[in-house]
Image: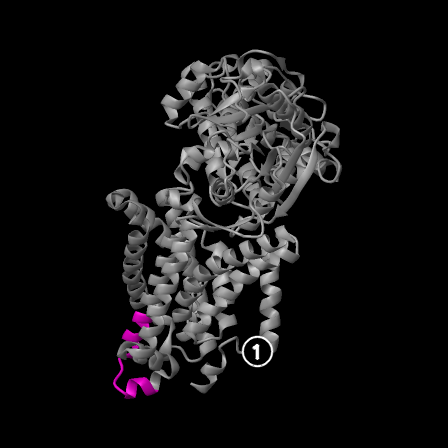
Amino acid sequence: MNRKTGLLAAVFGTAMLISMAGASAQDAKEIEIAAVMPLSGPWARLGEESKIGAELAVKQINENGGIKALGGAKLKLVVVDGGDSPDKFKNATQRLVSEHPDLAGGMGAYVSSFTLAVTEVTERAGIPWLTLSYSPKITDRGFKHVFATSPTAVKQADDGMPAIIDMAKQATGKAPTTVGIVMDNTPSPVGFTKNMHGDGLKKYGLDLVVDEQFTPPLSDCGPLMQKVRAARPDFLLLLLTATPDIKLCLEKLTEIGLPRTRLPIVNNGGVLGSPDLLKVMGKDLLEGSIFITANWGAKGQEDFIKKFEDETGEKWVTQDSISNYGHVMLLAAAMEMAKSADPEKVNEALHSMDISDGAATFFPGGHVKFAENGLREEAPLVIVQWQNGVPVTVWPKESAQAEPVWPQ
Amino acid sequence: MGPTVEHLLQTLSTGILVGCLYGLLCVGLAFIFGIMRVINFAQGDFMMLGMYIAVGVTLSFLGFLGASAPFVAALIAGIVMFLLGYLLHLLLISRTTGMRMSTELDSHQSQLILTLGVALFLQNGMLFLVGSAPLAQISSLSYSAWQIPLLYDDVSAVFINKARFLDALAAVLISVCLFALMRYTRMGKSLRAAAEDPEAALYMGIDVDKAHRIAFGLGAAIAGIAGGLIVLYYPAQPYVGLDFIIIMYAGVVLGGMGSVEGAFWGGMTIGLVQQLATLVIPLQLQNAAIFVVFVLILLVRPNGLFGRSVERA
């Protein structure tokens, strides 16, 4: 019996050695990293932007000589469409992990619920995973291989509200006293407003005068906006995630005499900055709209932005393109640090990373250090406003491409 | 008192405007499902195609028409969709209808799978061709309104959105034309006859296959026109049909199977319930209210609002 076990162990050991030798031989020429994104279904456009950012980073790294610590090994991006539900994402990731056993790391999957599903698989496979998703649950599960580069939705609300009030105060000389919330009931707005309903906004000196939720998509937002018109808040938290709803609501507000020049609107996330919005409504309707987001093109990145626009043909850098560009850069930096493409070593390097140059410059604050749970420490948010047909960063001051505009 | 009356009137007017378009959508499905008893899962995607055709036609060569371009484009979308529907029936759907199938259940099962396949093909085909970015007619009509002041104070007013009003008007006109076509023309009579008793219609010298093809083409054309009208205020993307298909089926069943007028009123009821429900229940239950009312109406009138005329026929 003992001899048998010994023999088996020897056979397995030899097989493993052979496969490891094969893997390291492959390492020298090409290192695989993965991007699992929604490339079909309602979130396809945002997945597409993420993919464009990641692909550009891989291309530039390879053109500049690959991973130097690994003898100039080239990166190869494996892009996987996860579809439109957490279940499909889980299956797609399982397939990815079994078809590509040598992945050094990965990124995805935009929507928080998809990211939760994807990381259940990648954690078990021991693959370091970077994400821009906002849900606090992503880093609350005790996982060792998940890294979130965005501030959580709750932190965005906690930091974003004082910033918005400050912006209004600086522009008009007095702080706003009333606010309205109109939101869809998807996880991102729900997380953002978690502490705002009822008297939650009192601590900012704000009275909540309208508080409405709906299940997207809307068929019409007339009655909803009529309530806003009747209550007439100083500004409106219009927390929408679907493009049709954005079109309906912005058009309706303009129609009933509340354009952005009279009633400022604030959204959360990157959807209000999508270049595609210009295909469904004129830029005049978007002018002045404000959104709080985790990442955006900012002052000091002019060279990168120009290169990005020239090479990809995209109109501007969005949260999804720049964050995933940054994710690839972070993985590359971790491989350089670890001098290895072994996922465990890359993971250790990410955990011990504390950088303020290179890959870190593609994230607000310009500093990347991950806490024990994988959440980026001191990740600040960015406030962006549509000005002259382009969404530009207006807050914080050191990253601002333009001064914020707030109606008097 | 003030805001309540204002809300009620605003909601009522929105309900009627939305209801007219739902009505037109349901009339389209009534030709295919209500009259011919063909289960068509691709009806929402016919609407989606209509949306894209209308935007494409407007952007490529109707720019000179100005504000009326979207309406002409919707008609063109209707014509294209008629041809497409006619061909689709000729080549595919006809194999799952009529006397080729032994029972109605048999044919329904094949239609279900076939049209679901067509729907998936259209959705993913469009995703492949035009991508996932939403697209809409950009017109100032969609964010301008006629403001009707309410006389009891200075600020209250009801806003009638211009795009939605013109869309609703077009929807009513087209529906009335279709009612007349079904009731007073020879073609309408042969369509009804072919639908009610194909065998007897055949003995009377009616080309039943052709009648079915025309009905299917008409159904697709109406979905196309409705799509062309809706895209004036609602963006198109490859999966947009899913948001509307359930409303179409509910409307047709609510109006009574087999009745084109009934389908219109079924759609109108849904539009009104969907909007008026927001006055009394939270907004996120808006669509749940539709189905509560749907079940209630069918409890009282199992054959739908206009169901009796079917029995008589």
Residue corresponding to mark 1: B301
- Relative to B13, residue A252 above or below: above
User: Observer-nearest residue: B137 or A19?
Assistant: B137
Task: Determine if the magenta segment contains residue A381.
Answer: no
Instruction: Characterize the magenta stretch by its predominant secondary structure.
Output: helix
User: Tag 1's secondary structure?
Assistant: loop
Location of the C terminus of chain A by quadrant is top right
Q: Chain of mark 1?
A: B
- Relative to A27, residue A266 above or below: below
Location of the N terminus of chain A by quadrant is top right
The quarter of the picture where residue B279 lies is bottom right
Q: Position of residue A95 (x, y in %)?
A: 54, 41
- Relative to A150, residue A340 above or below: above
Task: Determine if the magenta segment contains residue B206.
Answer: yes
Q: Which residues are magenta?
A: B200-215
Question: Is residue B47 visible from the viewing direction of this image?
Answer: yes
Residue type for callout 1: Arg
**Residue B279 as seen in the image, left or right of residue B19:** right
**Residue A361 as seen in the image, left or right of residue B67:** right
Q: Position of residue B71 (x, y in %)?
A: 32, 53
| Count of all numbered marks drawn on residues in the image | 1
Q: Position of residue A407 (x, y in %)?
A: 54, 27
Q: Residue at x 28, y 77 (%)?
A: B185
Farthest top residue in view: A357
